Amino acid sequence: MIGAEESISRKWTLPLLCVLGSSPARFGQIKAALAPRGATDRALSLTLRALRDDRLVTRRVIHESPPGVLYRLADRALPLATAVAYL
């Protein structure tokens, strides 16, 4: 696990926090929001994993058709997302 400071300094962390700050999202929705800015699947996956390890993002498997994963900001990340929204 990397430190929260390193996780926040990753290239896609702040844009990802902005996307998740408005509402929970599936990976495809996150990708659609950030792909025009050049985000790759790998970069988003690594960033989401780091944020999850730092307990800033939660990941919930959805058992429906089609199956998926829903990402949302953890309660402890809400103040950070609010601050990022003002930037």
Image (tube, rainbow, N blue to C red):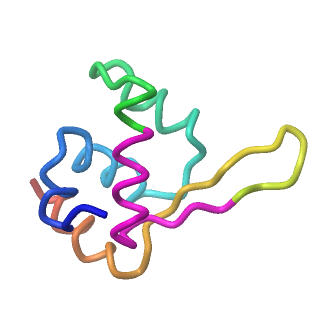
Task: Provide residue 87's location: percent of width, then percent of height.
Answer: 9, 53
In terms of depth relative to the viewer, which is nearer, 82 or 44? 44
The residue sitting at the right extreme is 65
1 vs 5, left or right, is: right
Look at 31% across and 51% down and name the residue there: 18
Q: Quadrant of residue 44?
A: top left
> Is the N terminus in the top left, top right, bottom left or bottom right quadrant?
bottom left
Residue 53, above or below 15: below
Percent coordinates x, y for residue 66 in the rendering: 84, 38
Residue 49 vs residue 11, the one in the foreground: 49
Q: Residue at x 22, y 49 (%)?
A: 14
Q: Is residue 48 magenta?
A: yes
Give the residue drawn at x 43%, y 63%: 52
Can you give x and y, in whole percent of width and height, for residue 2 in the image? Answer: 24, 61
Label tally: 0
Q: Which residues are magenta?
A: 45-60
